Image (spheres, rainbow, N blue to C red):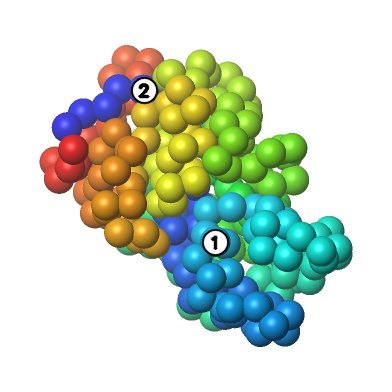
Amino acid sequence: MILICQAVLFDLDGVLVDSTPAVARVWGKWALAHGLQPETIIARAHGRRSIETIRDVAPDMDAEQENLRVEQMEIEDKDGVTALPGAVQLLGSLPQDRFAIVTSATRALAMARVAYAGLPLPKHVVSADDVVDGKPSPEPYLKGAELLGFAPHDCVVLEDAPAGIVSAQKAGMRVIALPNTYPAQDLAGATAIVKSLEEIEVHMSGESLRLHGAKLLP
């Protein structure tokens, strides 16, 4: 399968970086500290801004204050935060002005995880600090396209979470999903599903990007 586009927008956690153990540890501790069910909180936390998770599961709390606590816990927890297979190579094959990271993490947390994972620092980032409404709102991915200077329909998104897939689709973008955090059946709304970033190659074709994936699944 070949997708032709002008730019690629990457989610961070679960796409470029494996932070699942850290996310589970932090949200598990936070949930227990507040008498909440860890499994429920962890399941809701993936792919969303922390503050929105807190507002959802604990509407009576001071979400802004709790969000600061959770963020600091996440920044400090770097054990097991690593680059996912193929991430370094794929980012290295793209010109800096043709890709952006669009993440539900704050900029401080995103840059910490990029550094922990040994990824090259990206030139273009849309973080939780840059939007009013996080995923599944289309705002994050629309901001990513605007940042790079391309129309939404000229961008392809790489995502691992249902909320991110909905965000990209609402923005009018095609989505390649990776079943790193959720099973493939939960990612059915994506344009295609690929097992790993290692199965994607990017080639320049004139002014366009051609994403090749022999094992992309419909």
The quarter holding residue 133 reads: top right
The quarter holding residue 123 reads: top right
Q: Position of residue 118 (x, y in %)?
A: 51, 64
Residue at the spot 82% in from the left edge and 66% down from the top edge: 61
Distance from Cα at disc 2 to Cα at disc 1: 31 Å
Q: Amino acid at mark 1?
A: Arg
Q: Amino acid at mark 2?
A: Cys
Select label 2 or label 1 by which is in front: 1
SS category of the residue bearing label 2: strand
The residue pinned by badge 2 equals 5
Residue 148 in view in this figure: no
Q: Residues within 10 Å of mark 1 (few under 14, many from 20)?
A: some
The quarter holding residue 62 reads: bottom right
Q: Residues within 10 Å of mark 2 (few under 14, many from 20)?
A: many
Residue at the spot 51% in from the left edge and 36% down from the top edge: 167
From the viewer's perspective, tell me whether residue 123 is left or right of residue 81.
Answer: right
The residue pinned by badge 1 equals 44
Q: Position of residue 163 (x, y in %)?
A: 49, 46
